[in-house]
Amino acid sequence: MLAALALLLSACGGGSDAPKAAGPGGGAGAPPPPEVAVITVQTQTAPLVTELPGRVEASRVAQVRARVNGIVQKRLFREGSEVKAGQLLFQIDPAPYQAAVDSAKATLAKAQANLTQARELATRYKPLADARAISSQEYVNAQSAQAQAEADVASAQAALRTAQLNLGYAGVTAPISGRIGRALVTEGALVSATEATQLALIQQIDPVYVNATQSVAEVARLRQAQQATPVDLSAVRIVLEDGTELPQRGRLLFADLSVDPTSAQVLLRTEVANPGARLLPGMYVRARLVQGEIGGAMLVPQQAVTRGPQGDSALVVGADGKPAPRKLKISGASGTQWIVVDGLKPGDQVIVEGFQKMRPGGTVKPVPWAGPAAKPVAAAASSPAPAAASAAAPAASR
């Protein structure tokens, strides 16, 4: 019995020692290095793209206001619709202005009758004055009466035109073509020409203007670069607030000649076609302008660069497969990429994705980055990831 008990204890001890011996020698070994997406940088001539904040402004704006006093009888347009220049928008009560026209016509007819009488009298007096049958004073009085009658006719004609204009102003028309907003008055409202009551607002939004601002120092620097390497400044890309870029390109019209004294900014105006009315007045957008070129630069995706108070840096895969940080000097942006002018060499592999898979002091396996649409890191790491994670967990716990 004692021999059997000793044999049993030795067997239990040997079973507990077997896994310990099999762990380092007979296990799966160290996990494979994680895959990271990299780009291989090369020198090239990069466009210097400046992205400026801006606001959309209608190319033409007209305030529809009352030019006569009266009661609004009808609204003859649909709010938010497109209107044409000269289209009737509101009808103000025309009755008093029609009466004024009739009165002016009667006054004109009376003045024309007096003119006929005065002209005939002056015509009869002329031979009599030549024959000295009447005094010269009587002939002068006849001529004066004719001139006064002619002036009365001219005054009556002007009064008639004024009355007709006021009658025409009772029908409020669109001064320009464009999109009209909501009606600011309703039927039955009393409008006044003295107060110039605003009735509606018309804005022409095809094309539209994008007003952006840029610092004076930046404008001066880019003008010097433009003189050294001329580029086309007319094509401007418009980016919406959600990051969507419009397919149509804008055209830079001018840079303002004055500087805002409060912000030291210069206004840049861009004209953009707006066929689908995607841009509305007051909307916040960003304008991307190509304002120069940089030779011997390297383009690096913005997500690969870490920016901070100590400077800009990126992780580069070395010859030993270990990532190492590099200090970078950035000169601007080109779309979603930074323009790097110092800190990298041609052929360097810059890590773009897969940072969370790296282990301190460990090596990585670089794979080509396919861009933001496809993410090869996640696809390639789908199968080995569990093994790497399971191997890394005991290491972390140790």
Image (spheres, grey):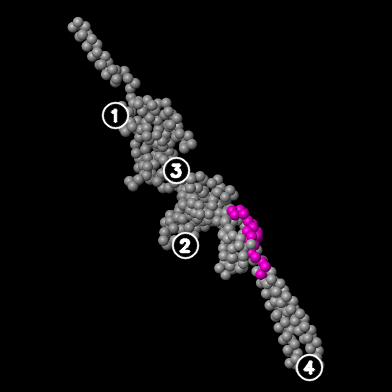
Mark pair 4, 2: CA separation: 76 Å
Q: Position of residue 234 (x, y in %)?
A: 53, 52
The residue segment tinted magenta is 74-97
Q: Amino acid at mark 3?
A: Gln
Label 3, on which residue? 337
Label 1, on which residue? 397
Q: Amino acid at mark 2?
A: Ser
Mark pair 4, 1: CA separation: 136 Å
Give whichever of discs 4 and 2 has the lower sequence position: 4
Check the picture and name the quadrant holding the N terminus.
top left
Residue 83 among those drawn in magenta: yes
Task: Indicate which label's residue lies in the foreground, 4 or 2.
Answer: 4
Q: Is residue 305 above or below residue 2?
A: below
Label 4, on which residue? 134
In the rendered structure, the answer to whether residue 266 lies left or right of residue 111 reads left
Q: In this orientation, which residue lies closer to the viewer: 147 or 70?
A: 70
Mark pair 2, 3: CA separation: 32 Å
Q: Position of residue 26 (x, y in %)?
A: 31, 18
Task: Find numbered disc 1 in the image and state the secondary structure of the residue it sits on.
Answer: helix
In the rendered structure, the answer to whether residue 68 lies left or right of residue 342 reads right
Q: Quadrant of residue 165?
A: bottom right
Label 2, on which residue? 258
Residue 163 among those drawn in magenta: no
